[in-house]
Amino acid sequence: MPEETLNPFLIAQKQVKGAVDELGLPESVYEILKQPLRVLEVAIPVVMDSGKVKVFVGYRSQHNDAIGPAKGGLRFAPGVNVDEVRALSMWMTFKCATLGLPFGGGKGGVICDPKRLSSRELEALSRGYIQAVSQIVGPEKDIPAPDVYTNPQIMAWMVDEFSRIRERNSFGLMTGKPLIIGGSAGRGTATGRGCVIVATEAARKLGIDIKKATVVVQGFGNAGSVAAQLISEMGATVVACNDSTAGVYNPKGLDVKAVIAHKGKTGSVKGFPGTTPVTNEELMQLECDILIPAALENQITEKVASGVKAKIISEAANGPTTPEADAILDKKGVLVLPDVLASAGGVTVSYFEWVQNLMNYYWSEKEVNEKLGDMMTRAFEAVYKMHLDKKVSMRRAAFMVAVARVAEAMKVRGWLD
């Protein structure tokens, strides 16, 4: 069998090409969308606590700004590379377009292990990164946000540094900030909440009673733990979850709040009382109604997909399913809610935060959650309609909805013949 395509940039290009062809759009649409408009690579010197200078490599990719300024996360991780950043910026373009947000796609990263950096070193790296990319970012150009191993504090340091450069407060530079400097209520739970909203809409379409549904959550970080808690509060039974160190399973159900407390105390879900250990692969192949992959890219591979028993997969992570796995799942009749739809809650509330920053008026958490629910439900209906009308997978349908919107913007702006 041919080796699976695991390069995220090649996967993203293939997804765009498929949508362009299915829609019958001109080849020029794909030629523009197959790569970012610009990718900046920067060197960031940091004086370490030892007194030595270490140079870190960082990236910022801006895929497309036909509909609006670039928008996308910034990750600090050892595995960051340029193809990952380019791919993630492409997915952000289509995630924003799927939700109807006035943004294009951006993404950034720094090659580092933040767990090995002191707070002072992490602050110096954060400030150094924003200094290095300051000419191409800003509220009207490109608005970063937290991602893997970055958080509101890192965003706050970057906002402060950018404000110094601009010589005025510029809270709209970043989203995912602390509330006190322009963050939005509801931002911390938005990705998990959005994932659950579309999962419950899909369950309704398939006639699955959410109160009787069983759920497996792969990846118990912010998005995964929030999704697990919210869907359990709706009456569903979460039977298994895992993190980077271990997986736990109880067919009678987990007390999600207790699992969250256990992880907070021990640093892992490992050893949660009354559970059986499961591997990552075993977890994703458990009997369940809904599987929520909320970890990293390329988790549901061809090998894993052949044993998946879930009826719905709601992707809280970016790019968790390989193209080969997608084909298998589609043939098996699994309804896959793609990342560009299911994980778009975060960027949607980031949009709300940006809007609130621009008008300097802030909404309650209830208002934010209600607006998020409206937008996620509307986006789901648009994608589901395309899925039924064109008889294509939900992933292809989402890309078709998104590519059509971006292509329309490029056409009216005169970018296409």
Image (cartoon, rainbow, N blue to C red):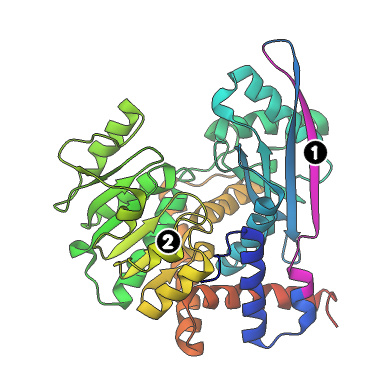
Write down the quadrant of residue 166 in the picture.
top right
Q: Does residue 202 sit above or below 58 in this rendering?
A: below
> Where does residue 251 sit, x and y in percent of width and height?
16, 53
Query: Does 345 sit left or right of 281 as displayed?
Result: right
Query: Of helix, strand and loop, which one carries label 1?
Result: strand
Identify the residue under disc 1.
Answer: 42
Type of amino acid under label 1: Val
Decide which of 306, 229 is in the foreground and name it.
306
Position of the C terminus, as image quadrant, is bottom right
The residue under the point 34% across, 68% down is 312
Badge 1 crowding class, 10 Å Cα cut-off, few under 14, some 14 to 19, many 20 or more, is: some
Decide which of 219, 200 is in the foreground and name it.
219
Query: Does 363 sit left or right of 30 as displayed?
Result: left
Query: Does 83 sit left or right of 216 as displayed?
Result: right
Identify the residue under disc 2.
Answer: 373
For this orientation, the residue located farthest to the front is: 1
Decide which of 118, 359 is in the foreground and name it.
118
What are the residue bounds of the magenta stretch?
31-49
Q: Is residue 35 magenta?
A: yes
The residue under the point 27% across, 58% down is 215
